[in-house]
Amino acid sequence: MTYHIFMDESHITIKEIAKEAHVGIGTVSRALNNSPNISDVTKAKIQAVIKAHNYKPNAPAAHLARKTISARYVGLIVRNFRIRFFYEVFESIHAALKKHHIRLLILEYSENAGTFFSQIMELNLSGLIFFTMRPNRKDTAAMRSRNIPFILIDSSLPHTYSITNDNYYGGKLAAEYLLRNGSQAPCYVHSKKSNQLDTLRYTGFRDGLKTALHTDGGTYAAALDENAGYKTGKKILSDRTADGVFCFSDEIAIGVLKAVRDAGSELPVIGYDGTRDTEGWGLSTISQNPYIIGKKAAAHIAALIAGSTPEQTAPLVLTPVLIDRGS
């Protein structure tokens, strides 16, 4: 991150410079630091305002700015960093970026999107990674105008590099797994906060069941944690209508599996993500390989920052795989 301390003879502030030059505060910061992520035209416009007001940076502050800007930072924007899948992707991104001498900041998304994104712009980051979310049209335009490279994980935008998983195919794999284990009326546990990933996984699951059973199966919903999964598992067992369970995430599935085992049941359960905890629990899962996602995301954002790859690239769609542990 870059810090600025300024002395000015005319008492004008950096905010007022930005207003007079019709740019953002972060853009003024980049101009003062001679950042390459700003056009020559914009830089000249800002310098004209600075010169007109005789605005001079304090020398120690300028030294701090030069020292800080030499360290490159990438921001990883996420809605919920408490889920295991995020942590495993984050670990992979962090390790890979470290080899490129790039530091990683975790930025939890705020519902006050306008204020949140304007604050992000002021951080003067070298790049951004959006995890299971995407910027709106205005914010996308702001990043492009400032030449800030960004990529998406588990979401997509036109003309933007993204890493996604074939969630529809993953849902079909889960259906096939339960059918092979003798299920005739398997159910699906949605994420309580429905999203595109959930819809695709359920659609694939439903279509896989229709081919063999001509049924959609039952549905439930749970928050993204083990406790919610456990309560949902008890509900499924008490209803006695489902003979197999496919869960939106591994965390939900672990909770359901705990309820099944506590009840002494042999109800088959499968999760989605492929997190490390599934091995300890002996949980079958549809793996999207968090390590590979993180490694590829880090490699591409590093290449964009270095200018060695085109900014507008077709999305990368990874194929999930079934990990059968007999759960």
Image: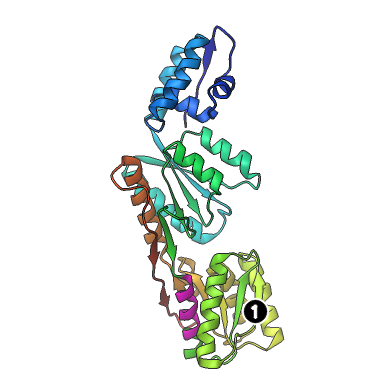
Q: Answer whether residue 124 is magenta in the image.
A: no
Q: Which residue is mark 1?
A: 219
Q: Is residue 225 above or below residue 35?
A: below
Whether residue 52 is situated above or below residue 89 in the rendered picture: above
Residue 26 percent location from the top left of the image = 51, 30
Q: Residue furthest top?
A: 9
Query: Given the image, on which type of amino acid does mark 1 rest?
Result: Thr
| Front residue of this view, candidates 151 and 140 | 140
Residue occupying the point 37% across, 40% down: 102
Q: How is the image coloured?
A: rainbow
Q: Position of residue 70 (x, y in %)?
A: 37, 30
**Residue drawn 42% across and 21% down?**
44
- Percent position (x, y) of residue 290? 42, 62
Q: Residues within 10 Å of mark 1 (few under 14, many from 20)?
A: some
Q: Quadrant of residue 190?
A: bottom right
Residue 130 in the image: state x and y as whole percent.
49, 51
Image-based side of 57 in relation to 117, left or right: left
Above or below — where is 135 with respect to 197?
above
Q: Give whichever of 235, 129 is nearer the camera.
A: 129
Which residues, given as a range, are shown in magenta? 167-176
Label 1 secondary element:
strand
Name the main secondary structure of what is drawn in magenta.
helix
For this view, does 141 lie left or right of residue 159? Answer: right
